[in-house]
Amino acid sequence: MGESRFILPPDLDFECTNCGRCCRDRWEIRVDAASAEKLLARDWGLGGVVPFKKRLPVAGVDAPATDELGYTVERKSCGSCVFLDAGNLCRVHAQLGLVEKPQVCQQFPYLFTDAPDGVTVGLSHYCPGVKRRPDAKAPPLANRQDELARLHAHALRLERVPDRVALDDGLDVAFADYVALEELLREIVLAPGRSVPDALGAAVLASAMLVEFLGTPGATPALFVAGWRRKGLDRMYEIAGRQRAAPRTGRLLLRQFLSLVDVALTPSSATGRAASGGWAFVKELIGFGSVPCAPLGERISVRAVRAVALPWDETAEPLRRYAEHVLFRRRLLPVLGVRVGLALLVLHIASMRYVARAHAARAGRDRANAEDVAAGLQLVEKHYAVHSSLVQAFATGPARSIFRRIAGKPRYALAVLGA
Ligand code: SF4
């Protein structure tokens, strides 16, 4: 792509608070070989610690050509980046300036997606410096175009939206048609006066109806979108609202997802991991025992989590805004396919509520508060959404086929959200 046209979130801003969270978390900080070797030539006064190590290929993710893998930044025993000093500041930034920092550090929390109509600038909600400015007259990031252009030119983990977007396996639409659908879905999710489950249920229903509609002769996505705009969306919410399933079904579907994630993140043998996922499912079924919670890094009691109240209306605004931003930043639906992407979005929202309740249970509260909800949102963003390679597991394979089946059924989406 030549000159980048940035598509900016209308009301999101970023101001680093120097909290140091992104430097202390145990994720991989990748550095290309040239940058690492330049920094290695300098004495950082780290008491003999070599600040970079050669990166090893990750099975199923990297090609085995190790030369292209570069380096990763070393960590202290407490987990912090070796360059983080006692004052919570980055030594590389302090001594050499922002542009010498590893690219991934400079880029955080921006998430770029290249699409046929421009570069979408998303923001990771893991970062507490990302804030909503509801009264913004213009996109708050509009005055950072030069910085964004520099970061985008060297961006790691870029997503790319193809010219034709998959609605479902074996069914794709032109990008312009996807954009019209995306606008409709964002409108459905943001509609005032609708609960988050009803809004997301209606979005899943709309995608399922579109797939069905395209099976009739002469049908086009444009006709579908125009038809619903004429009719109004009330009927869509009404049909979605009738698709109820038992909360128990939702809990078990959510547990399947959480176990898939936990199993993938647990460092043990494949057989041991599968057995642990199976046991977690049984415990959820009988409502007894403890299960691993990867985002909290500990086991939690199934019963204690269930006992925590978290009324939807108290979480509606952050979760609705988050869902809309996920649609905006285009890293799920147009990349994985609309149906699977929407199913994952629903699962992420349900997981946020689950982690918020687990967070409250751990603190001994029987009702989740705003701090628990914020923790749920940040931890799911990190472990399940944008900072995890788990999304790739949904690109192909058994996880994709399981969640593709869920995706087509709004009642399952509603059940998961009601879990
Ligand atoms: S997590 Fe966000 S606010 Fe905190 S140091 Fe990192 S970029 Fe800054």
Image (cartoon, grey):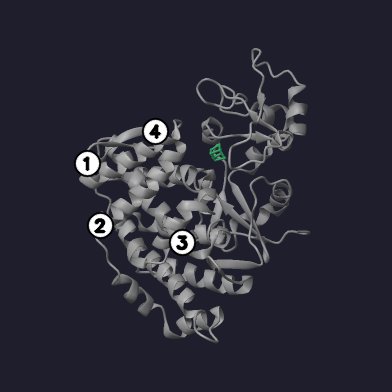
Q: CA distance from mark 3 to mark 2?
A: 20 Å
Q: CA distance from mark 2 to mark 1?
A: 15 Å
Q: Nearer the viewer, mark 4 or mark 3?
A: 4
Which residue has dot 3 on it? 342
The picture places residue 158, in percent across and down from the top left corner, at: 65, 50
Q: Nearer the viewer, residue 414 or 373?
A: 414
Q: Nearer the viewer, residue 119 or 165?
A: 165
The picture places residue 183, in percent across and down from the top left corner, at: 53, 71
Which residue has dot 2 on it? 247
Marks 2 and 1, the one that precedes in the sequence: 2
The answer to which image quadrant residue 389 occupies is top right
Marks 2 and 4, the one that precedes in the sequence: 2
Q: CA distance from mark 2 to mark 4?
A: 29 Å
- Mark 1 CB lies closer than 8 A to ligand 1: no
Which residue has dot 1 on it? 303
Marks 4 and 3, the one that precedes in the sequence: 4
Which residue has dot 4 on it? 272
Say which element carries label 1. helix
Marks 3 and 2, the one that precedes in the sequence: 2
Say left or right for 182 vs 49.
Answer: left
Query: Which three-letter amino acid code belongs to the residue tagged 3?
Result: Leu
Query: Which three-letter amino acid code belongs to the residue tagged 4?
Result: Gly
Residue at the (43%, 75%) spot, across then down? 209
Characterize the local packing of mark 2: few (<14), some (14-19) or many (20 or more) Cα atoms within 10 angstroms. some
Say left or right for 170 vs 195.
Answer: right
